[in-house]
Amino acid sequence: MSGLDFAGPDGSAAPSQAERRQGFAVYETLQRLGSMAWLIVGIVVVLVGAIWVLGQTSTIGGPLVAGAVIAAVAAPAVAALTTRRVPRVAATAMVLLALIAVGVLVVVLVLGGVSSQSAHISGTASRAVDKVQGWLEDVGVTSAGNAAQDVKKAVPEIRHTLLTGLAHGISGLTSIIVFLGFTIFSTFFMLKDGPSMRRWAERHMGLPLPIAQVVTGNTLHALRQYFLGLTIVGAFNGAVVGLGALALHVPLPGTIALVTMLASYVPILGAWTAGFFAFALALGAKGPSTALIMALIVFLANGPLQQIVQPITFGATLGLNPLVVLAVTISAGSLFGMLGLVLAAPLTSAAVNISRDLSRMRDAREGSEAKLEDAAPI
C-alpha cells in the first residue's frame, strides 16, 4: 500500500474523491440554507426598522424616498443626454423641469375638468338621488327620504373636499409645499450625483464589491422595469377608458385618458381615483345612465381587460406572476402604507433577481474549483 492510500479505523477503504465531494456538497447546502434563513430574518428586521424610522421622520424621509425612486427611474434619461455631450448638471435640470411640467399639467387638467363640471355634477347627482329615492319608496323602504336628504347635503361637501382638500392628502407632513420642495431638491441631487452615490454605497455595504454591484444593479433595474410595466398597463387602461369616454361623448376624453394612465403609477388607489374622476365628469355632463356605463368601462379596463395585458407585461418586465405582484403590494400597503404600495413589487423582483444572480456566481465559482481539483495531480 502506497503512502497515498488511506483506510478507515475499521480497515475499510477510505471514501473516494467523489464521495468526499458529495459530503461537502450536502454540508454546504445545509450551511447555505441556514445562512439564508438568518439573512431573511435580518432583512425583515432591517426593513421594519427602516420603515419605522421613515415613519418617525416622514417630513424628510418621505421626500427622500420619493426622490430616490424618481431619480432611479429617470436616471437613464439623464445618462442619454450626457452621452450627447450635455453637462450632467444641465441634463439633470432639463429632466427635472420636464417632470415638474408633466406634474403641473396633470394637476391643472384634473382640477380644471372637475371645476368646469362641478355645477352639473351637483345638480345631476341631486336628480339621481331623487330617482333612487322614488325607486326605494316604491318597494317599501320608508327611510329613503332621510337618506336622500343626507346625500344631497353631502354632495356639495364632497365637491368642496375634492377641490380644496388636495393639500391634506399626505398624512404627517407639514404641508404639500414642503413635501414637493424636499422631493424636488432630493431628486435633483440624486440625479446629478447618482453614479458617485452608487459607487460610495457599494464600497460601504460590507459586501464584496461584485456582490454589492449585483445588489444595487438589480434593485435599480427592478425599479425601472416595474415602472415600465406600469406605464404599459397604464397606457392600455387610459386608451380603453379614453375611447369609452369619446364614444359616450363625455367631456375631456383626452384628460380622462391621461389621468387614468398617470394614476396607474399609484397601485390600487390610483385606479379608484381615476375611475371616480371619469364617473364624475360623465355624471355631470350626461347623467346617471352614461355615468354608470362609464363606471362599467372603468371596471372592465382595470379588471378583466387588464388581466389580459398585466401577466404579459409584468412577466416580461419583472419576471413575476401578477398574483405575486398583487399579493405583495396589498400586504406591504397594509403594513407600510403608500411606501409599501409603491416599493413592494420592485423590491420583491429585485430580491428574486439578486438571489438568482448570486446563485449563478456561486455555481460558477464551485464549478471552477471542481475543475481545479480534478486537474490537480494525485
Image (cartoon, rainbow, N blue to C red):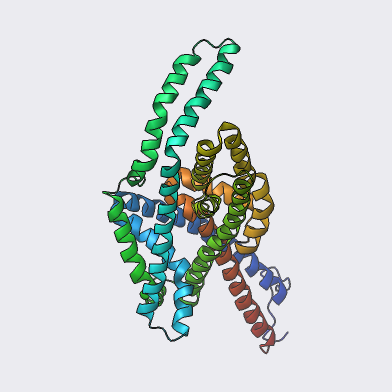
State the residue in front, 2 or 215: 215
Q: Residue at x 50, y 47 (%)?
A: 270
Rendered location of residue 73, percent (x, y) = 47, 66
Across and down, in percent, residue 67 comes to 38, 62
Q: Quadrant of the N terminus?
A: bottom right
Quarter-of-image position of residue 116: top left
| Residue 287 position within the rendered picture, expressed as x and y whole percent measured from the top left | 55, 33
Q: Is residue 145 above or below residue 354?
A: above
The image quadrant where one finds the C terminus is bottom right
Residue 315's spot in the image, x, y percent?
65, 59
From the viewer's perspective, tell me whether residue 112 is left or right of residue 238: left
Q: 201 or 82, which is in the foreground? A: 82
> Quick check: can you spot residue 16?
no
Above or below, 41 against 70 in this view is: above
Whether residue 178 is visible, yes or no, is yes
Q: How many marks?
A: 0
| Residue farthest to the bottom, as pictured | 377
In the foreground, 240 or 350: 240
Instruction: Relative to 198, say whether 327 is above or below.
Output: above
Please tell me in which quadrant of the rendered image residue 182 appears: bottom left
Viewer-side residue, 156 vs 271:
156
Q: Is residue 12 left or right of residue 310?
A: right
The residue that appears at 40% across and 53% down in the rendered structure is 108
In the rendered image, the residue lying farthest to the left is 174
